[in-house]
Amino acid sequence: MENSNHIIELLSILASDPTPSSGFETQESEFEQHQERRHKALREIAQLQGNPVVHKLLSAINREMPAGGGTRDQVLYAAQHLSRLLLPAVVKVRFEEAKLTNYARYLREAGAVDPFLEGANLTRDAFSLRGDVEPDTWADGVNLERRH
């Protein structure tokens, strides 16, 4: 997944709660600074909407908003809720990707292309109904027709 570390960092910011600096209560100024930080993270993540994970997150946020849009705090609350749900899945995918050995990556990538055909798609669907059927060939270059 491209930009996965950056996406995980931004989702972590969105999913976080403000940390009180003294005692058990968060001061209003600290809460506002935290909201600004989350808003900045949401703007950054919106710039990555070409990524399917980010696109789904933004779509889900839009679906949760009221018809006339929402306030900044409503958007941030929805983003926080959805980020908390999405973050473990993204971290798991990133972990699985990092766990692959170089050889496993090579096999996965090499299995998708033919070294003799540049840019060829080797899926089964790519070959269906393509080209003419050639008659069976046997020794000495003699083509033999099949008899039915």
Image (tube, rainbow, N blue to C red):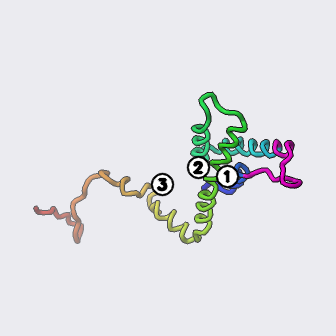
Q: Residue 44 is drawn in which quadrant?
A: top right
Kind of residue at badge 1:
Ile
86 vs 142, nearest the viewer: 86
Horizontal side, residue 2 vs residue 36: left or right: left
Q: Residue 127 is drawn in which quadrant?
A: bottom left
User: Which residue shows up at 81% across the image and 53% down it?
Assistant: 19
Q: Label 1, on which residue?
A: 7
Horizontal side, residue 148 vs residue 59: left or right: left
Residue 24 covered by magenta stretch: yes
Q: Label 3, on which residue?
A: 119
Residue 31 covered by magenta stretch: yes
Q: Are marks 2 and 1 in contact (CB under 8 Å)?
A: yes
Q: Earlier in the sequence, mark 2 or mark 3?
A: 2
**Mark 1 secondary-structure assignment:** helix
80 vs 109, nearest the viewer: 80
Kind of residue at badge 2:
Val
Horizontal side, residue 91 vs residue 107: left or right: right
Q: Are marks 3 and 1 in contact (CB under 8 Å)?
A: no
Q: Are marks 2 and 3 in contact (CB under 8 Å)?
A: no
Q: Earlier in the sequence, mark 2 or mark 1?
A: 1
Dot 3 alpha-carbon crowd within 10 angstroms: few under 14, some 14 to 19, many 20 or more = few
